Image: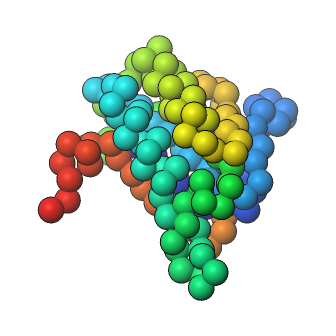
Amino acid sequence: MKAVVQRVRAARVEVDGESVGEIGRGLLVFLGVGAYDGEEDVAYMVDKIVGLRIFPDEDGKMNLSLLDVGGEMLVVSQFTLYGDCRKGRRPSFTDAAPPDKAERLYSLFVKGAMNAGCKRVETGRFGAIMIVYAENEGPVTMVLDSDWRRHPKE
């Protein structure tokens, strides 16, 4: 799984002009599911993202997690994170999971975030064309990949 995580003051997602998910202060998570991902990847990403210490403490240092600040999470499916642009000019998406698998693992991620104690978890609409609005705070943007659990930095 791959995720782009942004610390936000607020975020919302619309489908066909209708708001389908909206949060206040917290994390906007663009989540992509790879062809070889499984439930272990979901557990890794939930733990990593809800525990990511990217909120400022009383001294202004990034030292607090989403759970520490009582923040909210908006999760938006983003298969294009698996776009391979190394060859030619048109991305290849062969490394992305097929839609049925991707939706199942995306849903498990959302449930996992709820079970991890997130104050509120909202979503976009899987497979839809979405308009995403975000008030980035910082800005702070992190990129995470569940492959890191298999190949940790030494």
What colouring does the structure picture have? rainbow
Q: Is residue 14 left or right of residue 154?
A: right
Q: Quadrant of the C terminus?
A: bottom left
Tell me where residue 9 sits by quadrant: bottom right
Give x and y (percent) for residue 133: 73, 51
Residue shown at the point (59%, 24%) measured from the top left: 127
Between 132 and 102, the one lying in front of the other is: 102
Q: Position of residue 15 (x, y in %)?
A: 76, 31
Is 33 on the left-hand or right-hand side of 29? Answer: left
Residue 82 seen:
no
Residue 68 location, x and y as percent? 60, 60
Residue at (35% x, 47% y) in the render = 145
Residue 22 is at least partly visible in this image: yes
- From the top left corner, tell me how far across and down residue 24 is, in percent: 77, 54
Nearer-the-camera pick, 20 or 62: 62
- Residue at figure coordinates x 48%, y 54% from the top left: 51
The answer to whether residue 141 is above or below residue 95 is below
Q: Residue 7 is drawn in which quadrant?
A: bottom right
Most distant residue in the top direction = 100
Q: Nearer the viewer, residue 116 or 3?
A: 116
User: Which residue appears at 78% of the width and 33% of the height?
Assistant: 20
**Corner quadrant of residue 40:** top left
Answer left or right for 90 relative to 133: left
Q: Which residue is most to the left?
A: 154
Q: How many marks?
A: 0
In the image, residue 46 above or below residue 57: above
In the rendered image, the quadrant that contains the N terminus is top left
